[in-house]
Image (spheres, rainbow, N blue to C red):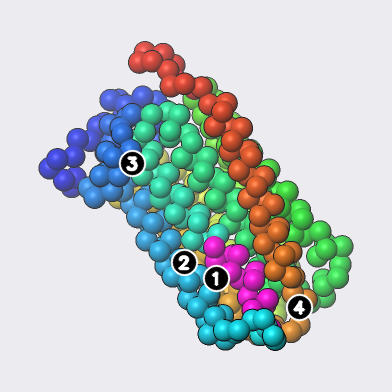
């Protein structure tokens, strides 16, 4: 139950922009202040679990990132004379862990601020999409360094895998942010565009994993890669199907609706993916060519710079929030 001081609204009491199909109650007052949005973290509404199912894991991934940094510092406390080979080997893992912490943090913040006015709401979710695109870029860096099939090393696909992933990251940010402009007038096209923006980069990045799974190898990491793929599929199905609230509108307003399932499946998939990458990194050490730190963080920085430029364009292009009674866009 919501806390006594929380004023929650039903779907007909909020503008269409703020409504979710099958969610009939538990809405926060629209056009809330940032302070009111943050206070809502501590009472139960239809966004509370969307927030905490990502904020809490963000803390875990940040801890893993810092632990990896500390481990490298202990292994190689004086990197100048003769750097330890573990340091460059861990570069793609560090880049990946950074994006693992970033995307659930951005997602939790976006859902927390989702009751802002239309312009603030759109900006928050555009940042969420950019962080998710960066996570796809981080996954590509880790896959290229640790996961690629050995027989594909040196191939044209391997050579262009990371550059194409950088391009996909920018395209993903652009298409997903553009979908916010379609949301009010063409909601189906908006959702289709947003889905495509993340499904296509995921499929491209996962080609090396799909190939290894198809070969029926006995490597220990493949079981974890398989479960990551299953979680990704469940995330896609929950995001697109709107189940279970579509079957019983109003029954899953606060707990158990599809977006919460989407978040949980996504985080579980990332956990499986992290353990699979860590296992591949340990078992295949010395068998794959490792990129330099400049190549790793340069690629990540290039993708981030492109996404930031797209965010800047989108922020400038967002229209002022319409007055009450006008149709929002």
Query: Residue, x 49% and y 61% (percent of image)?
Result: 101
Mark 1 or 2, closer to the camera: 2
Can you give x and y, in whole percent of width and height, for residue 133 in the image? 60, 50
Dot 4 and dot 3 residues touching (CB under 8 Å): no
Please indicate, yes or no, whether residue 323 appears anywhere in the rendered image. yes
Marks 1/2 in contact by CB < 8 Å: the verdict is yes
At 55% from the left and 59% from the top, the residue drawn is 99
Q: How far apart are marks 1 and 2 (CA)?
A: 10 Å
Closer to the observer: label 4 or label 3? 4
* Residue at numbered disc 4: 288
Main SS, magenta residues: helix
Q: Residues within 10 Å of mark 1 (few under 14, many from 20)?
A: many
Q: Mark 2 points at which residue?
A: 61
Q: Are marks 2 and 4 in contact (CB under 8 Å)?
A: no
SS assignment at label 3: loop
Query: Is 97 included in the stretch rendered in magenta?
Result: yes
| The quarter of the displayed image where residue 72 is located | bottom right
- Mark found first going from the N terminus, 2 or 4: 2
Cα separation, mark 2 vs mark 4, equals: 25 Å
Q: Earlier in the sequence, mark 3 or mark 1?
A: 3
Q: Name the residue under label 1.
A: 274
Name which of mark 1 and mark 2 comes first in the sequence.
2
Residue range of the region highlighted in magenta in the rendering: 85-98
What is the secondary structure assignment of the residue under circle 4? loop
Q: Earlier in the sequence, mark 4 or mark 3?
A: 3
Per the model, the C-alpha gap separating discs 2 and 3 is 35 Å
> Is the residue marked by circle 4 packed among few (<14), some (14-19), or many (20+) residues within 10 Å?
some
Q: Badge 2, how many Cα within 10 Å: few under 14, some, many 20+?
A: many
Mark 1: secondary structure: helix
């Amino acid at each position: 139950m919501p806390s006594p001081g929380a004023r929650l609204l039903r779907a007909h009491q909020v503008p269409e922009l703020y409504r979710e199909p099958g969610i009939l109650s538990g809405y926060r007052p629209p056009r809330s202040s940032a302070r009111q949005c943050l206070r809502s973290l501590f009472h139960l509404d239809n966004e509370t679990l969307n927030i905490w199912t990502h904020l809490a894991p963000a803390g875990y991934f940040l801890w893993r990132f810092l632990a990896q940094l500390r481990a490298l510092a202990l292994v190689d406390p004086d990197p100048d004379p003769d750097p330890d080979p573990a340091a460059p080997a861990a570069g793609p893992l560090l880049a990946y862990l950074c994006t693992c912490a970033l995307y659930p943090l951005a997602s939790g913040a976006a859902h927390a601020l989702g009751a802002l006015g239309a312009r603030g709401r759109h900006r928050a979710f555009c940042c969420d999409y950019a962080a998710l695109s960066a996570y796809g870029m981080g996954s590509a860096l880790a896959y290229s360094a640790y996961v690629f099939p050995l027989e594909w090393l040196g191939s044209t696909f391997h050579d262009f895998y990371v550059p194409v992933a950088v391009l996909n990251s920018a395209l993903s940010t652009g298409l997903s942010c553009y979908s916010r402009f379609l949301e009010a007038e063409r909601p189906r096209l908006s959702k289709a565009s947003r889905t495509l923006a993340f499904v296509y980069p995921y499929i491209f990045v996962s080609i090396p994993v799909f190939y290894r799974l198809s070969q029926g190898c006995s490597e220990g990491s493949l079981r974890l890669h398989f479960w990551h793929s299953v979680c990704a599929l469940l995330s896609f199905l929950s995001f697109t199907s709107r189940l279970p609230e579509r079957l019983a509108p109003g029954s899953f307003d606060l707990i158990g609706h599809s977006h919460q399932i989407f978040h949980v499946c996504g985080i579980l998939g990332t956990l499986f993916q992290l353990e699979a990458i860590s296992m591949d990194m340990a078992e295949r050490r010395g068998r794959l060519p490792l990129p330099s730190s400049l190549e790793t963080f340069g690629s990540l920085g290039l993708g981030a710079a492109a996404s930031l430029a797209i965010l800047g364009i989108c922020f400038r292009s967002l229209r002022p929030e319409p007055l009450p009674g006008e149709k929002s866009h």
